[in-house]
């Protein structure tokens, strides 16, 4: 059994006076120990809402959560608040996109880290301080003793993100959820942080749920990839399989539309037309239909099922997947 | 002669402090001696990380920032010295497209009025009818429906708003368009639409572009020549393909190796050159080579004391490094530990690296990677009155917070 197993997770916002808005619409995936699973998709596709739902951090009112999310056999979605709080910070940890907003601006970094060590590992005084310094050191923050006394705003963006990672790994969590952990950072700093995350997975066997819009990051890091569109997974496959054979028209289009550093200058890009605002409800058909070149009438008869048109384990939610005209045997 | 030539351009912002009197306590050396030429009909791409001075440079060309020193020669005229009345005529010929299309469009004006405003100011079109005709043409060119004229900015998607920004520049019939992060605020699937549009327009209208972006893959895609900036200065400049095929400056090598490529086959084979620490503050740039506090090839001589000039190393490939030839020949080796040990800071490796760096650096300028970045920050405890210009890290953070869509 997987460490985390998410089944048909759905999240609907039900603000009064407004139409219900389903942000996550039946998402399923599994994460094993020592494995990196990616959730990738564009702005608004439900990545953050998915992670907040798993962490139990969605607002209590005006939200309807459905499905199951079993962590080590226990359903996170129905767990009581006390138990969940114990899990968070010990076995489950999260890194947010914007490090500044998840650090307390008026409390020195050191106190924020030692607090966690005290609460979850029972370390006190000098012992906690020493462990905090060693954590900062481990994530590559130079001069940790001095840094511990500083406030978040005194650290650069890269250092703040490293401090957050230090806090997240303080209790050696079994599952780390990283929501766009490098999006706000420069690429040279991003490379440092990604290396750090890889190290964590390889050495500690941490399971990592990596949320990002950057297919480049996914290509270098994730074992399994789930591509989300409008709140649903439209394609799920192993990393190599997905990039070699993107089969859902959206995933296929996305890969054809991003400029690549290693592509010759002037190589034409093939954009996807329209924008993510041009969508229909999944209940009516395929949400991607208004932008899809493969669209047929069949696409408008309810949500397309996940199928495996290519290889086992490579799931695609599309009635007209992108397949080679005829598979010519080599 | 090139259409646009920058000659030793410097833009220094004074840092002011004090309650009653604005005392200048220092300068932000945002752009510190940049020379480059943009050829007519071509695209010059300027890349570099946050805070290296790209936007400031672009704004300086349009004189939206005061130029502290140096020349900006456009079509034979030095704009830097031009009185402001005479600058007006040139403003039309040099247009800018901004990163945040919504922030740069007045929400209360409809699209026709936004576009007509600039035309009227510059005397384009005899009357409203003629202007309307022209606006219709341009909207079609940038791929917007003609009914867009009577609609308001918020009614459009991000990609469409960027098209409006481009249309606003185009109606003035400019020669040069400076595009500052033209696609970075857009969704991945929409970026390609705008990139293609810029390329088509260049082809059909013969436009000259100065494209400013932090995304090296985007810049490589659209540029003929690429300039790489680090802390206010150009460190390397080369034709796009040559730069990709063989980056010569240590910073460019690191930058290029850090850009993720959406292809596992490529990613698995790539060797990353990981840099230590963060970008130093432009208010307090390191002496000598600006990159010496993070350079994996930093040498005992020269690097910390002499600023390397940007020199042609053959085939128009310019590099600002004292040891380009030696690094190329392999006779100068990487000095700082790179790779995972350096990042994770495994005690022994990190300690060794710092020791080596300290031993190599002159006494008054420790080469321990973070040192220069810290100085401006340590002056400010949160309770203290902050300087008018915040340290770079803070400025970035504010920007990022605003940019990042929140759940
Ligand atoms: N508290 C909320 N109330 C109502 N709608 C919400 C709320 N939080 C998120 N949403 C909506 O849910 C959808 C998914 O949002 P989410 O933040 O998960 O997107 P995302 O994939 O993380 O995007 P990004 O890449 O921009 O971070 C969006 O349409 C968003 O507007
Ligand atoms: N008006 C100003 N007054 C003082 N300092 C400024 C001003 N404008 C910019 N700076 C500073 O000058 C430096 C260069 O800023 P600039 O905006 O040009 O960088 P950039 O390369 O465009 O970065 P980004 O990729 O984040 O847009 C930064 O340290 C910035 O804080
Ligand atoms: S189901 Fe139809 S509309 Fe949706 S992606 Fe497949 S072909 Fe396109
Ligand atoms: S001059 Fe020295 S520090 Fe600067 S890039 Fe070259 S080797 Fe590195
Ligand atoms: Mg998000
Ligand atoms: Mg900028």
Image (cartoon, rainbow, N blue to C red):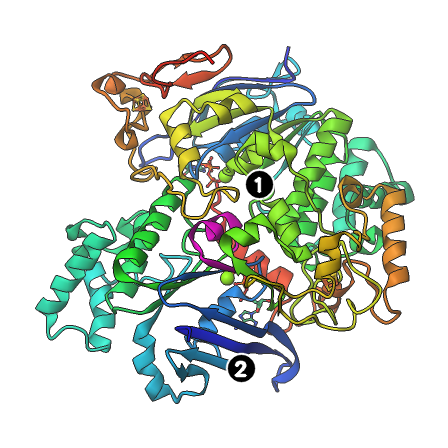
Numbered disc 2: secondary structure: strand
Does the image show residue B161? no
Q: Check the picture and name the quadrant holding the N terminus of chain A.
A: top right
Whether label 2 lies within 8 Å of ligand 2 gets the answer no
Q: Give coordinates of residue A256: x percent, y percent.
A: 41, 35
**Above or below B331: residue A26:** above
* Horizontal side of residue B252 vs B5, given as left or right: right
Which labelled disc corresponds to residue B199?
Answer: none
Q: Magenta residues? A: B214-230
Between discs 1 and 2, the one toward the N terminus = 2
Q: Give coordinates of residue B311: x percent, y percent.
A: 63, 69
Instruction: Identify which residue, B404 or B215, lies in the foreground.
Output: B215
Instruction: Identify which residue, B109 or B60, lies in the foreground.
Output: B60
Which labelled disc corresponds to residue B70?
Answer: 2
| Mark 2: few/some/many CA within 10 Å (<14, 14-19, 20+) | some
Q: Give coordinates of residue B149: x percent, y percent.
A: 18, 57
Q: Chain of mark 2?
A: B
Q: Which residue is mark 1?
A: B260
Q: Chain of mark 1?
A: B
Q: Answer whether labels 1 and 2 touch (C-beta < 8 Å).
A: no
């Amino acid at each position: 059994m997987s460490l985390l197993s998410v089944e048909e997770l759905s999240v609907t916002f039900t603000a009064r006076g407004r139409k219900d808005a389903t942000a996550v619409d039946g998402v399923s995936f599994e994460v094993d120990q020592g494995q990196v699973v990616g959730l990738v998709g564009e702005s608004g596709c439900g990545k953050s809402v998915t992670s907040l739902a798993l962490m139990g951090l969605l607002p209590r009112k005006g939200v309807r959560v459905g499905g199951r999310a079993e962590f080590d056999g226990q359903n996170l979605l129905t767990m009581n608040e006390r138990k969940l709080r114990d899990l968070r910070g010990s076995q489950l940890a999260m890194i947010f996109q914007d490090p500044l907003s998840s650090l307390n601006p008026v409390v020195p970094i050191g106190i924020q880290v030692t607090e966690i060590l005290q609460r979850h590992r029972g370390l006190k005084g000098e012992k906690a301080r020493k462990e905090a310094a060693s954590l900062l050191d481990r994530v590559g923050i130079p001069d940790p003793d001095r840094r511990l006394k500083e406030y978040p705003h005194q650290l650069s963006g890269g250092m703040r993100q490293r401090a957050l990672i230090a806090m997240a790994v303080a209790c050696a969590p079994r599952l780390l959820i990283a929501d766009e952990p490098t999006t706000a950072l420069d690429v040279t700093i991003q490379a440092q942080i990604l290396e750090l995350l890889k190290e964590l997975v390889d050495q500690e066997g941490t399971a990592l749920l990596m949320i990002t819009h950057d297919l480049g990051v996914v290509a270098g890091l994730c074992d399994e990839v789930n591509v989300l569109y409008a709140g649903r997974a439209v394609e799920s496959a192993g990393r190599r399989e997905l990039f070699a054979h993107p089969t859902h028209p959206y995933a296929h289009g996305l890969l054809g539309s991003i400029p690549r550093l290693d592509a010759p200058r002037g190589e034409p890009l093939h954009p996807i037309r329209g924008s993510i605002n041009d969508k229909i409800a999944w209940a009516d058909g395929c949400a991607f239909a208004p932008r899809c070149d493969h669209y047929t009438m069949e696409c408008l008869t309810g949500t397309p099922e996940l199928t495996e048109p290519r290889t086992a384990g490579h799931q695609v939610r599309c009635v007209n997947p992108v397949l080679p005209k005829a598979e010519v045997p080599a | 002669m090139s259409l646009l030539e920058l000659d030793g351009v410097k833009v220094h912002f004074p840092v002011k402090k004090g309650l009653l009197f604005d005392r200048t306590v220092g300068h932000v050396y945002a752009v510190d001696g940049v020379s480059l030429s943009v050829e007519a009909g071509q695209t010059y791409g300027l890349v570099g990380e946050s805070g290296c001075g790209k936007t400031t440079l672009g704004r300086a060309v349009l004189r939206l920032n005061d130029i502290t020193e140096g020349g900006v020669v456009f079509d034979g005229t030095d704009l830097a010295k031009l009185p402001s009345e005479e600058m007006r005529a040139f403003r039309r010929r040099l247009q800018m497209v901004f990163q945040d299309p919504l922030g740069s469009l007045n929400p209360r004006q409809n699209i026709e009025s936004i576009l007509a405003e600039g035309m009227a100011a510059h005397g384009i079109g005899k009357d409203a009818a003629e202007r309307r005709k022209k606006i219709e043409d341009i909207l079609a060119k940038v791929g917007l429906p003609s009914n867009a004229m009577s609609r308001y900015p918020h009614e459009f998607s991000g990609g469409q708003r960027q098209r409006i920004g481009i249309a606003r520049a185009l109606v003035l019939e400019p020669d040069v368009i400076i595009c500052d992060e033209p696609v970075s605020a857009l969704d991945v699937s929409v970026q390609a639409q705008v990139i293609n549009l810029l390329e088509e327009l260049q082809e059909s209208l013969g436009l000259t572009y100065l494209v400013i972006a932090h995304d090296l893959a985007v810049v490589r895609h659209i540029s003929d020549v690429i300039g790489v900036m680090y802390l206010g200065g150009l460190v390397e400049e080369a034709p796009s393909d040559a730069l990709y095929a063989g980056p010569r400056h240590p910073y460019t090598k690191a930058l290029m190796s850090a850009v993720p490529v959406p292809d596992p086959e490529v990613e698995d084979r790539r060797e990353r050159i990981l840099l230590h620490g963060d970008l130093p503050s432009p208010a307090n740039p390191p002496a000598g080579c600006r990159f010496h506090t993070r350079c994996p090839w930093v040498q005992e001589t020269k690097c910390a004391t002499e600023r390397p000039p940007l020199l042609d190393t053959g085939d128009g490939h310019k590099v600002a490094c004292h040891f380009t030839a030696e690094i190329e020949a392999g006779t100068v080796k990487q000095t700082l530990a790179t790779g995972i040990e350096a990042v994770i800071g495994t005690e022994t490796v990190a300690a060794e690296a710092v020791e080596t760096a300290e031993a190599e650096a002159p006494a008054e300028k420790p080469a321990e990677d973070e040192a220069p970045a810290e100085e401006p920050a340590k002056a400010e405890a949160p309770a203290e009155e902050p300087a008018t210009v915040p340290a770079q890290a803070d400025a970035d953070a504010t920007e990022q917070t605003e940019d990042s869509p929140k759940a």
